[in-house]
Every structure is written in C-alpha cells, then in structure tokens.
Amino acid sequence: MMDNDTLDMLRTSLRHVLTEATNVPLADRLGELGWDEVVADDPVTALHTLFTLKGDTVSSADALGPRLAAALADALGDPQLTTATVGMESPFGPSSLTDGSLTVDAVVFTPPSDNPVVVRVDGEHLAVVVGSALTCTRLTTTDGELAQFRLTGTVPASQVQCIEGATASIAWSAMVTHGRWLLACELVGIAQHVTDSAAQYTGERIQYGKPIGTFQALQHRIATAHVLVVGAARLAEHAGHSGDEWSALVAKAVAGQAAETACTQAQQCYGAIGFTWEHEFHHYLRRTYVLDRLLGDWRSLEREIGNELMNSRHVPKIGML
Amino acid sequence: MDLSYSPEAEAYRAKVRAFLAANLPADWQGLGALAGDEAEEWADRWRDVMAKNGFLGITWPKEYGGQGLTKLEQVVLGEELARARVPQYRAVDTTNIKMLGNTLVKWGTEEQKQKYLPRILSGEDTWVQGYSEPEAGSDLASVHLKAELDGDEWVLNGQKIWTSRGMEGTAIFLLARTDKTAAKHRGITFMLCSIPTPGLEVRPIRTLTGVEEFCEVFLTDVRIPVANVVGPVNEGWKVANSLLGLERGEEAATNPIYFKAELERVIQLARDKGRINDPIIRDRLAWCHMKVEMMRFLGYRILTAVLRDGALGPEASISKLFWSEYHQVLADLAMELLGPEATVREGRRPYKHYRADEPGAANSSNSWIDVFLMNARSGTVYAGTSEIQRNILAENILGLPKEPQTNS
C-alpha cells in the first residue's frame, strides 16, 4: 500500500502529466514516471488516483483505451492483446459477423495502426482484426476535445480471429467492470471539481452587497451536490478494492448521476458566466455527458440494477454492509 | 378565467389566417426544417413580409406605423403564427420590437416616437439591450454604468454584458447610473445610443455551444444627447420594469403552443428509438404532457388578467419558473432517448438559443444537444433566475418575511 507522502507526490506528478500541453501520448509520459511499477505495486490506488485526477483536470488524454485492452488481455490470458484497441458501442449501429465476413462499426479514442482491434459482435462474440484493415474517421462530438473516432469496414472472416461463447462473455464482462470502475472515478473527479469550484465561486461573487453563497437557495444547491459526490466517491473506492461486477455497476450509476447533478447545481450557481466558453465549466459539463454514456449511462445502469434485484430476489452486499 | 374572444378578435383571427394562407408555401413545415443561414435568411425575408402587411407592432398607434389594435389582437396574432409554425419576427426583434418599441410607445416623447417607431418596424434600426453588467446580474438595480451631465449631453463610462445579438445592433438602449447618492433603484436613467458611436465598442462572447450569441459592450466617454433619455431622469428603473412586464405577458399564449409542438417531437423520438413502450419513458412523457397542459391553463389565467385589468397577475412569476424548469426535464428526456447518439453532433443546429427549437426541426442530435446545453439550461438563469422568481413568489405573492440577508 502507498503511504500518504508517496500518494501526495504521485498526485502532484500526475496532475502535471495530465495538464501539460504536449502531443506526446499519455502512455509515454506516464512511462517516464515509472508508472508501470506504480501500478504493479498498488494498482487500485494508482488507477483510482489517475482517473479521479483526470476528471478533476478534465484531461482529454486517452487513459481508458489502454486500460480496457489490459483488462481484456488479462481476462483472456492473451498478452498480445494488451496493445489492442477496444471498440466501444457505435451510435450508428452494431458490428456483426455474417456469411464469412465481419462488418465493423465501433467508436475508439485513439486511432489504431497495425495493432489488433477487438470489437463485440452480435452482442456476444468478440472479433479480433488488424487495425489497418479498417477505416477510421474522427467524429464531431458533444465533448469536442475528447477525441472519438468511428471505425468502419468489412473484413473477410479469414482475417478475423473470433472468440466465442463463455470465454468471450466472461472476458468482456471483466473488461466492462474494470472500465466502469475507472469511469466512475473520473466522473467523481468531475463532480468533486465542479462542486468545489461552485462553492468557491459563490463565496466570491457579490450581488446585493453580499457573496451569493450567503443565500440559502444556493447553499442548498451546493450541499445537494456534495451529498451525492461524497456517496459516489466512497462507492468508486469500494468498487476498486472489491473488483466485483456489481460494485462497479453501482459505482458507475451513482457517479454518473452525481456528476450530472453537480453540473446542474453548479451551473445555476454560476449564472450567465457558466454559459460561456471563457469559463472552464462547459468542459466539465460536456465531458460528463460523454463519460456517462460510455459502458452504460446512469439511467440504463439503474434499470440493470433494478432488474437484477427483482430477478435474484435478494439485495447483494456492498462492502461490509 | 374567461377564454372567449370578442367578435372583433375572431374577425382579426380570420384576417391573419387569410394572410398566412396567401403568403406561406403550401408545404411549410416550420423554420426548423431550414438549416443555418437558410433559416436566418428566411426569417429576415418573412419579417419584411410581416412589416409590409402591417403585422408588426400592431398595438402601436397608427401615426407611428402601428395598427392601433388591442392586446387581445396581439394575442390572437401570436397564437395564429405559432399554430402556423412561423416566427413573429427575427430573433433580434425580441429586444427591438417587443422590448424597446413597446417601451417607447409607453414612455417615449412625441419626437422619440415619431423618430424611432417607424424605423423599428421597417427594419432600418435594430435595437439591442444594455441592462446587465458584470456586477449587476440578478441584482440588476445595482447598475454602475456612470453617466455625468456635461451641457446638453450625458457622458457615459462603464460596461454592459449579455447583450443578445449585440453584433446585429444599430442602436442600444441602456440603463445608466445618473445619481450615485440616490437609493439603488432611484438613480437610474433609461437612455438611447446609436451604434456606431465614438467610444462604444461591442465584442462578442462565445457561448458554451460555440455560438457568438451574446456581447459585451464597453463605453468610454460616450456622449449621448439629453433628448435620448426615455422617461424621467432617475426613473429608468420604473421604465425598465414596465418593459420586463411586457416580456412576460405575451408569452402566456404562445409558450404552450411551442412547447406542445416540441413535446410531440420528443414523442416521435421515443417512437423512432423503439422506446415508446418503455413504462419509464411513457411515465416521463405523460409527466411532460401534464406540465404543458398546466402551462396552457396558467397562460389563460395570465391572459385573462392582462386583458381584464391591463396588468400581469401573480401567475406571471409562476409562469417563468414553470416553463423554464419544465424545459430542462424535457431536454434531459430527449438526450436520454438519443442514447449514444447524444455524444456525436449531426444535422442542423437550432436557429435560436432560447426556448424550444423551431417547429419542423428534425430530431437531429445537434438540435437536442444545443437545446439541452444552451436553450433549456439558460432558461432558469436569464430574465430572472429561478431563485429570484421563487423569492418574488415567496415574498411578494405569499407575503413571507423577506430574507434577512437581502438589502434593497
């Protein structure tokens, strides 16, 4: 386990790495920090810290892509897949494998080169294909700064490695669980930042001769956000330590809702300045909506939680509860 | 509540319908069916058609280019235009005709009315609003824009902000501090200033959707003739408030029509996305429908009060709070229905950056992303935040004790 001093130093270094203006890929910059050793030593603390800070600094670096590949490679016991690009659900349609060819439609954060691309086909199997066989187009996104690319193409089955059945499902679930935990951390980072920043702003902004933070209407808004943020942060922490599917599902659902609520409350506190490009808030607002929609938005996850509770007829434990 | 219209008003309705039938294309779907510059150009042309046929400023006296009609006919006109899916005028005419024009009719000198009102209707002049300042938002009465009398001119120094469509303005109406020693609400004067004027600079502000909708206005030794004061010196707060009242009243009839059309688009979106049988979605759609119906009857109450007493009743504050908070829920629902599509911008963007997107708009992700990020979310901030509306309701309507921290 990392001690507090080491953790503080790590936070400082990561904040620098996430905010410096450079074109060097995040993985290379993390490499200079000896990141692999830090992760090997205490993966939960290291990744929790990275993704929470990524949310806090609204960094657009692709940290998630490599983690999804690592989780998938680990679950499948195939080290070659650590360099893979994992395709996420595309708004334009699914990928499918029919009559001897694979049709790909997926969204990724970094364009693949000649590394493997893994996509989920027909909602069950996994297909692995070389990235250079696909067409990659940058999307105009709601976020604007977080790069997203659409991968499309049709590839003959002879060039596709297909992973089927339970192996595929189990590996994909493990990856989704890992990804949901990391996204929960990132959303918590956003929610914390936005809530703290709104609290600071209302303490400084003067109307009617007083800081607007003295008005209870705004105090209650920030307190409302804070309650959700604190709850979401604890669930995200727990999801990291337990590593189980249910905890990650609950953590992601709560974190998405917390970030959305924090943004809504904060925006009302900022007033008109919150609708401008010059204020930092819009980055956090738009990022929230994109991250929430990765690997299941909070409303869909809530439904999943409800279905699970009704089907299993018992309430699963979270932590010591 | 009396929902019946007079025979005169019904006759006017028939006239409006005949005009619309003669002037709108047979396959007209609404401004939302046109994209970008096309919508801007169409709205400009349509405004000219409205002006030439005497459908702008209809309650203004005939000698200033109006039609000398009543507020009831104004309501009928608004209803018919909304039903026919056409705008009343360009977006900037909200400040130009609705706000400044109506204020001049009420407060302007004979000379001001003769000089400005016909030019507003013809489109020669376009007036934009200079109320808010960086330090005067919710607390609008604390305007600092300094005005000092020098002979027969006021000399202005300071800044305005959130001027809607400021780059289109050929003139600006301003609230300036003319008496620093008077109580906050008493030392303000309403003034007119043409653009360009030496010392006045208009700079666009980029909004979070990347659009340059609002402006900042900087004033350095700007000289305004004393003849450009509207209403009495130091009573600009009263002048401005009568204008904010006008901003609320007319919307009562048209808001429910636009919001109903928008809800129908969301119901279509639920069908298109295969979610129409989802009980949670149906529940939320039903909730929205009930709110729009409530909005309609709230509107009738407001109209009845305006038409009977010539004044806004307490429902006016409820109305702003009601539709703006409703609209955020509706926009959330639309974004949820879009699903992963909500992360990718595609299709036409809305013509205006407040309220519902135009009738006839396709359910493109760009329409809903902008409505969600800008139109719906800003609704609880502009023209009096939800917090201010609730304060008014609690303190002025319900008679609760004033918040101890608020000075006035």
Image: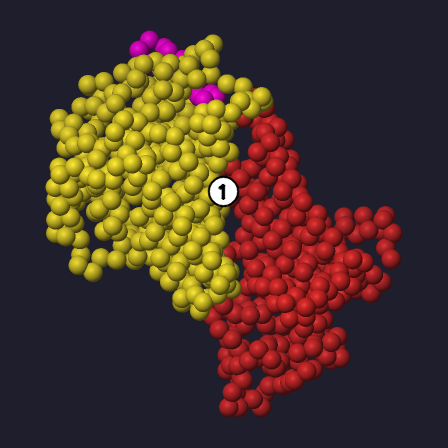
Identify which amino acid the numbered label 1 is placed on: Phe
> Which residue is under mark 1?
A275
Q: Is residue A86 above or below residue B137?
A: below
Q: Which chain is yellow?
A: B
Q: Secondary structure at mark 1?
A: helix
Q: Which residues are magenta?
A: B141-153
Instruction: Please name the residue shown 47% across and 48% down the image.
Output: B328
Q: Decide if residue A281 is on the left or right side of residue B271.
A: right
Asked if residue A192 is among those painted magenta in the image, a careful observer would answer no
Asked if residue B151 is among those painted magenta in the image, a careful observer would answer yes
Q: Position of residue B192 (x, y in %)?
A: 31, 23
Q: Identify the chain of the residue marked 1, using the numbered disc in the image.
A: A
Instruction: Please name the residue shown 51% across and 37% down the image.
Output: A271
Picture quadrant of residue B116: top left
Q: Position of residue B55 (x, y in %)?
A: 17, 39
Q: Coloring scheme of the render?
A: by chain
Q: Position of residue A267 (x, y in %)?
A: 54, 42
Instruction: Please name the residue shown 58% across and 53% down the image.
Output: A288
Q: Colour of chain A?
A: red
